[in-house]
Structures are given as structure tokens and as C-alpha cells.
Amino acid sequence: MTNRRKVLIRQSIPRVRRLADCPELLALDPCPNSAVAIMETLMNRISGALLAIISVGACGASTQALADNPLGAYIGFGAGESNAGNNNYSFDYGYDGGFHSNLAWKAILGIRPLPIMGAELEYIDFGSNGGSDGFYASNYYYGANSHPKAGVLYGLGYLPLPLPFLDVYGKLGVARLQTDLTSFSGCPVGGAASCTPVPYRLDQSDNRFAYGAGVQAKFQDFAFRAEYERIDSPFGDPAAFTVSATWTF
């Protein structure tokens, strides 16, 4: 082979350049192992991103499970008109039915795990009002004031109506009723004009039977209800008609 042919063959074969022969490559990557380090860094970042995505997804699933609210928990507040109902320790001498047109209010915490069944814990204040003056056993009673209030645990039953936005329900429960009644006993009929009126105060708590019924309309997470409830008491039954709004979690 001639020298000319050797030169031509050598020129036609591409030369493999060493890193040492390429200062521009060394400037870009002075350490050949840095490519591995870069890949490890990328993999760590990708793993971190995936972990973050999984964590957010789990958090979202937990939030969704909480939003589903399997117990149907809700809170509410209501107000309306009441009759305090107390008749001065069962002595019916003109006070019975005299406690009316009081402003009542209540707070509600409830659950509805089933469409036809639920439970509520309620605090209701029947308001404060004066009663009628009158005679009993030849004595004149006056200045009566009654202020009943109660914490009530109710069980609720709902009618299976075909209308998803409307509920009709009844409720039965046990109330811790606080009876607070004050009055004054005056002089007997025909008695001495100098006699001194005797104040009377009744303040006690009893477990009593409570019941009621109502209707409510639902809109998204809110419900608006009108209901009547009454608590049985030997001192006269406090009762109330209220309108309320509730919000389901």
C-alpha cells in the first residue's frame, strides 16, 4: 500500500477524541462522574415530587371522607314564641296560662346517620315573663315571674317522603328542666291592712318528658325548619313554637 493510500484511509476514519484533548468538554464537565450525581439528584427530586403528590392525594382523600360526613352531623340556632307555662307550684289560681308571648331561643347539635332516624342535643331558653295575679286559699298572689330553661336529648323520626328537599318529623326525649319561679303572697281577704307580703321562690331541676314535631326544607347543606315542642312539668308545661336554621358539616 502506498503512502498516499495510507494517508487517505487515516483521514477517512473519525478520530475518538480524549477528554484530555478537549478542554472545552472539561470546562463543561470537569468530572466524568458528575453525570451520575446529576442523575441521582434528578431521581431524588422526582421521588420527592411523587411523595408530595401522594401526600396531597391522601390528604384530599381524608378531606373528602370528612366532607362526606357519614353521621350527618349538623348545628343550628332558632328563636320563636313560648309559653312559660308555670302556675306557681301547681296552685291554679289565675297564673295557669298567664305566661305567654315570651321570646324563646335555642341551640342545636344533631346527627342524622339514617334518612329516617336522627338525634339532637338541644338547649332551649323559654324566656322570662310575668303571670296573672289572683287569689288562692283566700290569699292574694301577685308579681309572679317565670323563667324555665332546659337541656334536652331528643330522638327524631322522619317520614319517608318522596320529596328529597322536604322533611316532616316528630321527636321524643328527656329534658333536664330548670324551673325558676318567683311570686309574692299578699294578705288574706278581709285581713289586716298591716300584713306583710311573703315572697316565694321556686328554683329546681327535674328530668322531664319532652316531645315535639316539625317540618323542614333543605337547600344544599342548609335546612330551615319550623317546629313545636313541649316539656311535661308538674309546675305547668313550658312550650315553644320556633323557626330554626341548621348547617350540615
Image (tube, rainbow, N blue to C red):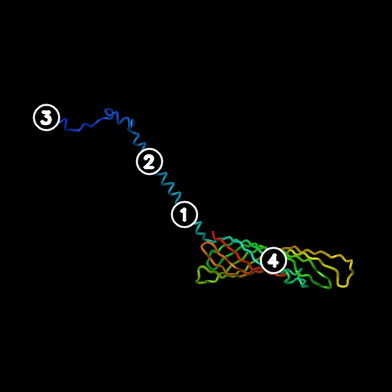
Q: Are marks 4 and 1 in contact (CB under 8 Å)?
A: no
Q: Amino acid at mark 1?
A: Ala
- The quadrant of the picture occupied by the C terminus is bottom right
Q: Position of residue 229 (x, y in %)?
A: 64, 69
Q: Report the mark closest to the observer, 4 or 1.
A: 4
Considering only order in the chain, which callout, 1 or 2, is on the residue closer to the N terminus? 2
Q: How far apart are labels 3 and 1 at the CA level?
A: 75 Å
* Dot in front, 3 or 4: 4
Which callout, 2 or 4, points at the residue further toward the start of the chain?
2
Where's residue 84, x and y in %? 70, 67
Instruction: Evaluate if marks 3 and 4 touch, with contact meaning CB atoms under 8 Å apart.
Output: no
Residue lying farthest top? 3
- What distance separates the C-alpha of mark 3 from that of mark 2? 50 Å
Query: Which numbered disc, 3 or 4, marks the residue that appears first in the sequence?
Result: 3
Q: Secondary structure at mark 2?
A: helix
Residue 178 screen position, x and y as percent: 71, 63
Question: Secondary structure beneath disc 3?
Answer: helix
Residue ID for mark 4: 102
Question: Where, by quadrant of the figure, is residue 153 drawn?
Answer: bottom right
Label for residue 42? 2
Position of 108 relative to 16 (above/below):
below
Residue at horizontal 86%, vertical 65%? 196
SS at badge 1:
helix
- Is 40 situated left or right of 4 in this image? right
Residue at position x 24%, y 31% in the image: 17
Q: Marks 2 and 4, how far apart in space?
A: 73 Å
Residue holding disc 3: 5
Instruction: Of the two numbered discs 3 and 1 on the same chain, state the one appearing first in sequence.
Output: 3
Classify 10 Å Cα crowding around label 2: few (below 14), some (14-19), many (20 and above).
Answer: few
For the N terminus, give its image quadrant: top left
For label 1, the residue is 61
Mark 3 to mark 4 CA distance (whole Å): 120 Å
